[in-house]
Amino acid sequence: MKVKLIIATIKPFKLEEVREALTGIGVRGMMVTEIKGFGSQSGHTEIYRGAEYAVNFVPKIKLELVVSSGMAEQVVETIKATAQTGKIGDGKIFVLDVAQAVRVRTGETDADAL
């Protein structure tokens, strides 16, 4: 059975809601990283001590999940539905094929390693 890597960037305040939704559909693990980036937003300006300055990178959360191929579409739909605010900067989702997965503790591979 093939496995997929799903990488999603979402707004930080959506993390707990997305995590709960993914757990609810049977996702058993994910990696979460605090990142900064920009897309269509291209950053924004802020005032600090009376001076305006450009903020070129916006805080985001990066989720990385490895799931069976059969579950990938449901995971994408769940993230999309849960993370969406309808405003610019809601994020992106990428789905990649995984060539190999290994559980370090047991040596299990691919879907068994999940």
Image (cartoon, rainbow, N blue to C red):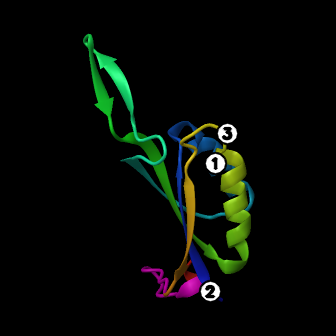
Considering only vertical position in the picture, is 52 above or below 54?
above
**What number is the disc on residue 2?**
2
**Could you say where residue 58 lies in the image, as x and y percent from the top left?**
41, 39
Considering only vertical position in the picture, is 22 above or below 10?
below
At x 62%, y 50%, the residue is 19
Real-space Cα separation, disc 2 to disc 1, in angstroms = 24 Å
Magenta includes 113?
no
**Could you say where residue 20 lies in the image, as x and y percent from the top left?**
67, 48
- In screen coordinates, is 48 left or right of 15? left
Looking at this view, is 17 or 43 the one in front? 43
Q: What residue type is labelled 1?
A: Val
Mark earlier in primary sequence (2, 1): 2
**Could you say where residue 67 lies in the image, as x and y percent from the top left?**
62, 73
Question: Which dot, 1 or 3, sits closer to the camera?
Answer: 3
Labels 3 & 2 near each other (Cβ < 8 A): no
Mark earlier in primary sequence (3, 2): 2
Real-space Cα separation, disc 3 to disc 2, in angstroms = 33 Å
- Residue indicated by mark 1: 18
Q: Which amino acid does label 2 sit on?
A: Lys
Considering only vertical position in the picture, is 14 above or below 69?
above
Start-end of magenta stretch: 100-111
How dense is the environment of label 2, judged by Cα within 10 Å: few (below 14), some, or many (20 and up)?
some
Q: In which quarter of the image is the N terminus?
A: bottom right
Q: Magenta residues: mostly which secondary structure?
A: loop
- Residue indicated by mark 3: 86
Q: In which quarter of the image is the C terminus?
A: bottom right
- In screen coordinates, is 24 left or right of 110? right
At x 72%, y 59%, the residue is 77
Count of marks placed on residues: 3
Real-space Cα separation, disc 1 to disc 3, in angstroms = 15 Å
Mark earlier in primary sequence (1, 3): 1
